[in-house]
Amino acid sequence: MEEPTKIYFICIFNRARSQMAEAFAKKYGGDRVVVSSAGVDGAKEIHPMTVEVMKEVGIDISQNKSKTINMKTFVSSDVIVKLCEEANERCPIVPFGIK
């Protein structure tokens, strides 16, 4: 069996976009992916509207926690997705070989 693709979603606070992306990737990627998300800046609580919107599509993220970038996860990822321009500008440089 092929190794799962490691995907890391990055935004500013890890309280909306990256939380949603992580949840959708886990749902649709199944065991083909290992998914994490984080924020560039200090962790905040997940935005209540994010939890509500995901609940509307049948995905419960109410127990998720906001996280800041973990460099071990960052450098071991296969794919890093920066979800906004500010994150793109402030995120660490993606190492060679990571998409």
Image (spheres, grey):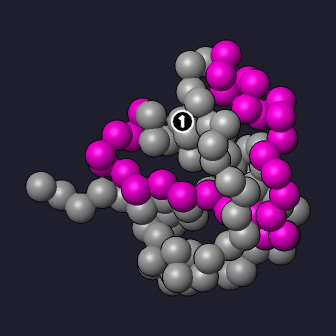
> Which quadrant holds residue 24?
top right
The picture places residue 73, in percent across and down from the top left corner, at 52, 74
Q: Give the magenta part as a residue range.
A: 28-56
- Residue found at x 52% / y 82%: 72
Image side of residue 97 versus residue 91, left or right: left
User: In the displayed structure, would residue 75 be above or below residue 12?
Assistant: below
- Would residue 94 be seen by someone viewing this image from the given angle? no
Q: Residue at x 34, y 40 (%)?
A: 30
Judged left or right of residue 2, residue 68 is: right
| 66 or 8, nearer to the observer | 66
User: Which residue appears at 84% of the width and 41% of the height?
Assistant: 47
Q: Which residue is mark 1?
A: 24
Residue sitting farthest toward the front: 63
Residue 58's x, y, as percent?
56, 19
Tell whether position 49 is magenta. yes
Is 5 placed above or below 28 here? below
Residue sticking out furthest to the left: 1
